[in-house]
Image: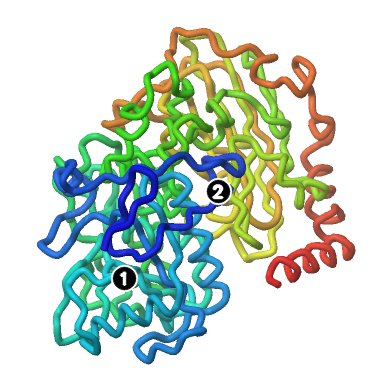
Amino acid sequence: MAISNGSSEYPFMNEPPKIKPHGLVSYFLGGNRPLDEVTHRSPENGLDRNLKSVFDRKPNQKLWDGIYYWVNDGSVNIKEFTPISPKAQRAMRAAARFWDSVMCIPFQEVSGSEALKNVEWWRGDHGHEHHHPGHHFLFSQHLPVREAAHATIGWLHTVDADLHLPPNLMHLGDEASPMTVIHEFGHTLGMLHMQMRGDRDEYIHVDFAAIDIAHYHLPNEKNANFNHKWTQDRYAEFPYEFGSTMHYSAAAFAKHGAETMNPLPKFEVYHDTMGHGLPTLYDIMSVHRHYGCHTVCPEKYAPDQLPKCENGGINNPRNCRGDCICPVGFAPPLCKMAVTQCGRAIEVDHHRRSFQLAYPKFRDIFDDERASGGSIYIRHEERRTCTYFLRAPPGSRIKVTIEGLEFHKFRDDCGRGCRNCGLEFKLISDHRYTGATFCQKSNVGRELVSEGHILPIIVYNTIGGVIGRIAYELTNDPPTLTMADLPGSTPTYSHQEEAPTLRELDPYHPINYKDPIDEQSWPELRETYLNTGNYNSPLATLIFCAMFIYQLL
């Protein structure tokens, strides 16, 4: 049975998708966005021809026309499925809201009773026709490994008849985070791991001997997570992205103290960018191309009716005339290069100078508005960003030196792939591309050179705080990396164009504004924010814990 929703049809569902006008406040969308009419892209209209662009197509792999997922909270007893934890339930819903907010197909939660009907059909308990109303549901299942997760790739519409179970599954450990589930939904949509691209050996080295086969219960060291799977025609359009949500961290599946992957020397600045966690703009563009979402807005509206997205941003097929989907660090609605209260604009000349940053200050911890270029807020897990724009004359390059870097946090470290906090430097002239990310004190003293005359520096955190001291100056040194090193990248600005003025970049502060923390010495700043500062005060700890508990309720 097919039902209609406007001009769209969603097969096999017995009620319209209840798409709600609130997506995840994502790393790309700076707030709640109204939803545009959903446009369904059927296989007859060409989606099957695009299928191979994201994963190797098999006979039983198809595209979803909507992902209708069951969050297994235990309210309905289905003996084949163990309920997932409350944290995993929240993570699954949050991740689905994120993808729903940027895709041209709906993500709709279905009830336990509908899930039960689907399982009964697969068991053969009822004589349903092949097109059962819930034939293409996504089921969630408990996974014994606390922080692990895995999911089937693409929509599997057939399965071994002896199993008598629905084929589309997502297994979630008790501590699965929203970032993890966003990655798993990427698999559900049809994405493979970035490190499985056929050209990955041009960017990283995989040490198969470092894979801990026994601990992770892997079949062999040539594990599918690291095998080459993509051929060139499936990825040539987009650059190899170290910061992709589908890229593992350096130590993924590694034996204790070892690393399974390392960037080649040319790309060593991206070591801690691998495993970054959140989807990048190129991730979203790749899935859009896979599902035909990139054609939705041009087909529905004339060019002069669509927002003019800047700095590499793209129109959102979920709401074509709403806010653009922006590169990290750039401000909705049009992805302008502008500070939004948090951050600063800094003029660079031949004199070496330094600025200091401390983010967030305690008063900002619960202030969702002080975020530049969007933030991610998922119940008690959040990532806030703050962008500093360094500008120089056209045709010049900027050299920065990390003179100080410290982290105050409630976890042991910033996490693999700098998931919890760090500094991101967008070095190449394609600002859609994830920048080189650093979250270890060992990076103090590191020098970086931009490809162009505009250098966004993004400081972010999930829990805790970041302080840093950055020196900057003009240079004739060669750039650390260029777009030529990353085929598929495209410039988002011209090296010959004048950068936005300081007033355009930063409407909130006076020209050449100097943050009071710049008046402090580095030892004073460390003392203020790490030792006797707000984060360590008993009152701050009490308030933070109270807020944490409240959000869990």
N-terminal of the two: label 1 or label 2? 2
Bin the neighbour count of mark 1 within 10 Å (Cα to Cα): few under 14, some 14-19, many 20 and up.
Answer: many
Query: Residue type at mark 2?
Result: Pro
- How far apart marks 1 and 2 lie (CA) works out to 24 Å
Residue 444 or residue 490, whichever sits in front: 490
Q: In the orientation shown, which residue stands out farthest toward the bottom?
A: 79
- The quarter of the image holding the N terminus is bottom left
- Residue 367, position as x, y percentages in the image: 76, 47
Residue 9 or residue 361, whichever sits in front: 9
- Residue 353, position as x, y percentages in the image: 69, 22
Question: Which residue appears at 40% of the width and 74% of the height?
Answer: 140
- Residue 481, position as x, y percentages in the image: 38, 29
Question: Which residue appears at 27% of the width and 40% of the height?
Answer: 292
Residue 211 to residue 307: above or below: below
Label 1: which residue?
134
Question: Which residue appears at 24% of the width and 34% of the height?
Answer: 237
Q: In the orientation shown, which residue stands out farthest toward the right?
A: 539
Asked which quadrant contains residue 139, the reply is bottom left
- Is residue 517 found left or right of 477 in the rendered image? right
- Is residue 314 found left or right of 85 in the rendered image? left
Bin the neighbour count of mark 2 within 10 Å (Cα to Cα): few under 14, some 14-19, many 20 and up.
Answer: few
- Residue 317, position as x, y percentages in the image: 40, 38
Question: Which residue appears at 51% of the width and 17% of the height?
Answer: 453
Asked which quadrant contains residue 471, the reply is top right
Label 2: which residue?
21
